[in-house]
């Protein structure tokens, strides 16, 4: 396992997530893109904050067995 | 879109440049390592990608910060914005009221009916205008930059311009405020004036009193308004308003219609003044002036034409001066105009008169005429020796006989031909001479005359005797 492979692994997953594609890796699980819209959130001190939109990676592990 | 395992391997092979089999082997190695670490309840970190961890039976993936920022690169610069939504104070007041109601039941009557808690809850007293919540437009890199700081930075770069802009803005806002206040004041004043005038209309007077007072008021107003200072309408209106106020105290019978009438008069007078100014400025002559100039021009042209003998107008067209024909020292053949001939003068005197005559149109004879004249002179020299009679057919022409009659043989246009005919008669020792006659159609005509007679009868008798030499259409005519 080389560094180039690891680098390529992370790049491919990142690019496909940016392109809103889900990636299934056998023996590990599935990476899915999740988009969160902007929303108002209230902090503990009572200040309301407008949160920006956000994209995240959701990982669903493969079921064993 | 869903990417399966094989596709994922192909993509890794493409990006890394490694063979597909090698990539497959290395992926298997990676997966085994991860699974082993997770089986040992340990987390496995791929640098720059994330951490795989296991909590109980659940496998988790925590992406690294680098991966998160790369995924959210399109939302870069968007940070959480604090929203200032103050709490309504009414709630506190209502709470206080409720507390007071609990603590002091005597104050219940004080607030009873004055404050409705439901209404206060709906319409809070100290409710400030809520700022609109920032939408997606405010997201972005530039949205989070402080405007004031940027302006001040720009001002520091540009020097005084930032301050000038501020000053200009302040002045403009102040001017707007002043204008609005002035407008409000003006409208209030005008409304007050109108109200006061309307109030004054209700006073009752006898008809005679009202008539006399109205006449006096109108006269006074006109006298005051139509003074020298009629320059601007505004001034007049101001004076009207001032008079309204002053007369309201003294003579309240004046009403608004009268004042309006006076204002109309002022306006009409000013309009007339302005129109007069305009007409004076343009200098447009009236139609009568045009007519007078045209008639004068036509008259001048006609007089000029008449003076140039193009048109015959009596007392204007000059009479064509009779052409003087002089034969220098030959008294018998000297034909004089009746004006030049004197009754007492001799032929020589006549010749002298002829020389001294003031007629400008003196005909200068040509060479042929001069030759003919010379021949006439030679013949006349013989006749000079004979004595001159007053009347007669033969002999020399006497100046005294010009008051009588003569036989006109020919009236010729050519002077040379006339002279030739006269010469023939003179050669035959007849008393012959020429009389030039001005004719409008043919110019100057020359009459070849024969004899000088005291009366028409003598002339006719003589004409009968010398019938052979006379033409058929001769005429007897008075010489002068």
Image (cartoon, coloured by chain):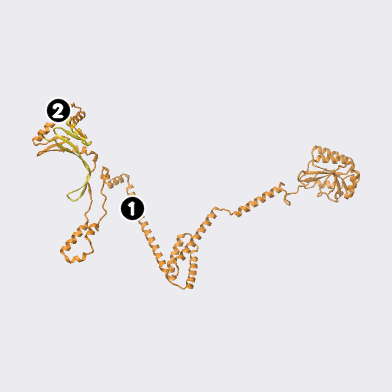
Query: Disc 1 designates what residue?
Result: B170
Q: Are marks 1 and 2 on the same chain?
A: yes
Mark 1 neighbour density, 10 Å: few (under 14) some (14–19) many (20 or more): few
Q: Which chain is orange?
A: B
Q: Which residue is mark 2?
A: B25
Q: Which mark is residue B66?
A: none
Left or right, B382 with respect to A40, comes to right
- Residue B131 picture location, percent across and down: 26, 51
Q: Secondary structure at mark 2?
A: helix
Horizontal and vertical percent position of residue B469:
88, 41
Q: Label 2 crowding class (10 Å Cα cut-off): few <14, some 14-19, many 20+?
A: few
- x and y percentages locating residue B211 in the rendered image: 49, 71
Q: Is disc 1 in contact with disc 2, using a CB cutoff of under 8 Å? A: no
Q: Residue at x 61, y 55 (%)?
A: B288
> Any idea which chain is the yellow one in this picture?
A
C-alpha separation, residue under disc 1 versus residue under disc 2: 75 Å
Q: Nearer the viewer, residue B64 or B436?
A: B64
Q: Quadrant of the N terminus of chain B?
A: top left
Which chain does the numbered disc 1 sit on?
Answer: B
């Amino acid at each position: 396992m080389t560094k180039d492979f690891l680098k390529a692994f992370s790049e491919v997953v990142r690019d496909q997530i940016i392109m809103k594609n889900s990636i299934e890796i056998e023996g590990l699980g599935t990476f899915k893109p999740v988009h969160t819209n902007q929303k108002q959130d209230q902090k503990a001190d009572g200040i309301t904050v407008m949160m920006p939109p956000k994209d995240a990676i959701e990982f669903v592990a493969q079921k064993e067995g | 879109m869903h990417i399966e395992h094989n596709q994922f391997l192909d993509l890794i092979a493409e990006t890394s440049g490694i063979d597909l089999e090698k990539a497959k082997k290395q992926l298997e190695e990676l997966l085994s390592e991860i699974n082993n670490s997770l089986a040992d309840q340990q987390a496995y970190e791929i640098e720059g990608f994330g951490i795989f961890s296991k909590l109980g039976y659940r496998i988790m993936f925590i992406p690294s910060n680098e991966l998160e920022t790369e995924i959210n690169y399109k939302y870069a610069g968007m940070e959480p914005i604090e929203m200032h939504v103050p709490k309504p104070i009414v709630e506190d007041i209502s709470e206080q009221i409720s507390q007071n109601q609990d603590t002091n039941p005597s104050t219940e009557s004080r607030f009873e009916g004055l404050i409705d808690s439901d209404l206060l809850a709906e319409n809070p007293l100290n409710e400030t205008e809520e700022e609109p919540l920032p939408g997606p437009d405010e997201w972005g890199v530039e949205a989070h930059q402080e405007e004031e700081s940027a302006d001040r930075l720009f001002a520091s770069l540009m020097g005084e311009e930032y301050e000038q802009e501020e000053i200009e803005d302040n002045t403009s806002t102040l001017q707007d405020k002043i204008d609005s206040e002035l407008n409000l004041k003006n409208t209030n004043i005008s409304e007050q004036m109108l109200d006061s005038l309307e109030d004054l209309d209700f006073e009752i007077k006898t008809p005679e009193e009202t008539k006399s007072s109205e006449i006096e008021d109108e006269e006074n107003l006109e006298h005051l308004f139509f003074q020298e200072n009629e320059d601007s309408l505004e001034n007049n209106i101001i004076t009207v308003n001032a008079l309204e106020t002053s007369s309201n105290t003294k003579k309240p019978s004046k009403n608004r219609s009268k004042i309006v009438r006076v204002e109309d008069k002022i306006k009409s007078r000013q309009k007339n003044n302005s129109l007069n100014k305009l007409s004076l400025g343009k200098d447009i002559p009236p139609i009568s002036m045009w007519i007078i100039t045209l008639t004068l021009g036509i008259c001048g042209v006609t007089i000029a034409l008449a003076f140039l003998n193009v048109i015959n107008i009596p007392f204007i067209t000059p009479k064509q001066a009779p052409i003087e024909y002089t034969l220098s020292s030959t008294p018998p053949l000297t034909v004089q105009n009746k004006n030049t001939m004197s009754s007492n003068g001799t032929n020589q005197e006549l010749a002298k008169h002829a020389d001294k005559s003031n007629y400008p149109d003196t005909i200068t004879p040509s060479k042929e005429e001069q030759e003919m004249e010379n021949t006439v002179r030679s013949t006349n020299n013989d006749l000079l020796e004979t004595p001159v009679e007053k009347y007669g057919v033969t002999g020399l022409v006497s100046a005294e006989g010009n008051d009588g009659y003569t036989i006109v043989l020919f009236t010729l246009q050519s002077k040379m031909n006339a002279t030739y005919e006269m010469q023939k008669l003179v050669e035959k020792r007849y008393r012959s001479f020429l009389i030039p006659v001005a004719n409008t159609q043919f110019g100057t005509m020359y009459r070849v005359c024969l004899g000088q007679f005291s009366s028409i009868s003598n002339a006719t008798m003589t004409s009968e005797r010398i019938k052979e030499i006379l033409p058929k259409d001769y005429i007897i005519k008075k010489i002068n």
